[in-house]
Amino acid sequence: MAEPLSPAAPDAASALFTVLLTLTPDALEQALSAEPEKAAPLVRAAAEVGLAEGQVRLGRMLLEGVGLPQDQQAAFRWFHRAAEQGHVEAWNMLGRCLENGWGVVRDLAQAAPWFAKAAEAGDAWAQYNLGHLYLNGQGVDRDPVAAVAWYRTASAQGHARAMNLMGRCCEQGWGAPQDPKAAAGWYRLSAEGGYFRGQFNHASVLIAQGRRDEARTWLRAAIDQAPAASRSLMIQVGASAWGLDGIAPAA
């Protein structure tokens, strides 16, 4: 179903537009970042008045069904409006929608240029996403060397997931010389950055080094953050393959 562009009454919409005009940039950022249900009317007003940041935020809310009913097609349209204004995050989100078929027909070949545009503009998530396409040969010719280059660039910005993939590439020799020591370093950085897969991989390195207590700590951290399917597998590996006890998820 198409999303109505102006669900609020005219007087209410006019009042919201007036509020937008009176807010300082910092105040506007705070208002748009409020609790989703409370922020939704102002976010929509900001989007409709043409603010690219409001359009991206509205797109995210509609994509995820947070603060508003989920409408992925409408989300895609709002991301496109923001992208036309040069909003870097919107470029990445268009790539994500095309990559996953959110609100649009899945098309990896069309996703790649949007990721590349955002990646070249410095967006760490886009750099990570573009790295995936190159690593797997999806929408682009497979190029593990290019994948590593983009993962490395994202990692330099503190992207913990990219650090974990740097570890995998160094461990397996994908697009980089096989280097277990370098892989271990990347897994540690990813773990310290809070990514559950990096924490699990770091724990596996520690187990191989005989550092069982440290491994248990990192495995617990990974289990606490992992989605249910990954959590079950991690618990099984920790208990059966690594012989660790006391690794149940936090209550």
Image (cartoon, rainbow, N blue to C red):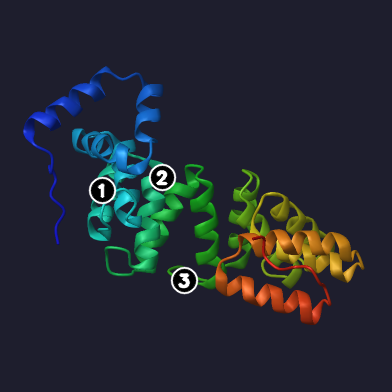
Q: Residue at x 69, y 54 (%)?
A: 190
| Percent coordinates x, y for residue 213 in the rendering | 87, 62
Q: Nearer the viewer, residue 135 or 75?
A: 75
Which secondary structure, mark 3? loop
Estimate the spatial distance between the alpha carbons at disc 2 and disc 3, rounded to whole Å: 21 Å
Q: Residues within 10 Å of mark 2 (few under 14, many from 20)?
A: many
Task: Look at the picture and state if 155 lies above or below 244.
Answer: above
Q: Residue at x 30, y 49 (%)?
A: 59
Report which quarter residue 110 is drawn in: bottom left
Closer to the observer: label 2 or label 3? 2
Quadrant where the C terminus sits is bottom right
Q: Earlier in the sequence, mark 1 or mark 2?
A: 1
Q: Residue at x 67, y 66 (%)?
A: 175
Asked whether residue 166 is in view, the answer is no
In the image, 234: left or right of 62?
Answer: right
| Percent coordinates x, y for residue 139 in the rendering | 42, 69
Estimate the spatial distance between the alpha carbons at disc 3 and disc 1, rounded to whole Å: 25 Å
Q: Residue at x 32, y 55 (%)?
A: 65
Label at residue 138: 3
Report which quarter residue 186 is drawn in: bottom right
Quadrant where the N terminus sits is bottom left
Q: Which residue is the site of mark 2? A: 89
Asked whether residue 122 is in view, the answer is yes
Check disc 3 and give the amino acid type: Gln
Point out the residue furthest to the front here.
251
Which secondary structure, mark 2? helix
In the image, 142: left or right of 94?
Answer: right
Label at residue 78: 1
